Amino acid sequence: MVTNRAERIFLFFVYLLLACSALAVLFPLLYVFSVSLTPYAEVLKNGGFTIIPRNITFEAYTAFMTDSNIPRAYGVTIFITVAGTALNLLLTTLMAYPLSRKRLPLRGPIMMFLVFTMLFNGGMIPTYLVVKATGLIDSLWSMIVPGAVHTFYLLIMKTYFENLPESLDEAAKVDGAGDLRILAMIVIPLSAPILATVGLFYSVGHWNEFLGAILYVGDAGKHPLQVVLRGILNTSQMPELDFERVLPTESLQMAAVILSTLPILIVYPFIQKYFTQGALLGSVKG
């Protein structure tokens, strides 16, 4: 409760700071969305800057969606996001749960090995050679398998599992349950916040996949959305598309930004309620 003038002034500056922060985040999004819907003549008339368009056109979005590469690229991105996130969560959970149990033999050395890989990795060329040796080059799985388990997310999930009381395990074992049954029937139902949080981290990474596709996938028909959008915008590398003669480049760029970020923006509000709780409980050992 505010009791004096000093606290009211402090709260005023706090709210002012929050309002400025919200404006700094929302204004670029509003600008990008507005320009993507604004006719090019109106953009030029306003000196390339417009917030509220007088006329609305979907030509930029139509140009993208009628291009045969976009639906295919969406399909590739959705596949690597769904399959990749499912594989990430499966392997990360199967590794994090045993490591969270103190009775696991060699638990300490295994943890040291995992942390070592987080601090020191082989780098781009050795990773490429491993992907090539395993026959994943030009495969969609080359964008999924090399990052199947992220050590940092593994540690967050392990810490969350450690906060669950081991008495649950003991009670289940008394009733005859095995480790896999305990994990599936008890631990996972109690771990929705951390699964949603880590799943969001993994899915955003897969949705924004770019470097892996450039390095490992030479077949243009298997490129994800980010690579295809980059190729369309860079018309000098794809002259056969020649969008610049039809539509303004700036509107295409803004439409590409909306198309590449909108699905994640739609999904986030549905799991936001788990996000804070999962990140907090998974990062703080209690």
Image (tube, helix red, strand yellow):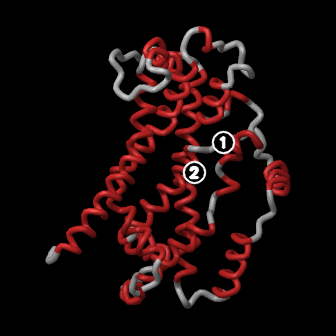
Residue 236 picture location, percent across and down: 73, 20
Residue at (38% x, 65% y) in the render: 276
Q: SS class of the residue under badge 2? A: helix
Q: Is mark 1 on a helix, strand or loop?
A: loop
Q: Distance between the residues labelled 2 and 1?
A: 9 Å
Check disc 1: other Cα within 10 Å, few if <14, some if 14-19, many if 20+. some
Where residue 205 appears, as percent x and y from the top left, is 57, 51
Above or below 24: residue 76: above
Identify the residue under disc 1: 210
**How many residues crowd around disc 2 within 10 Å: few (fewer than 14), some, or many (20 or more)?**
some
Labels 2 and 1: the sequence-earlier one: 2
Residue located 54% across and 55% down the image = 202
Tell me which amino acid carries mark 2.
Gly
Q: Which of 182 and 49 lies nearest the eye of the viewer?
A: 49
Quarter of the image for the C terminus: give it: bottom left
Q: Which residue is drawn at 23% across and 74% down?
A: 6
Q: Which residue corresponds to mark 2? A: 205
In the foreground, 15 or 211 = 15
Amino acid bearing label 1: Phe
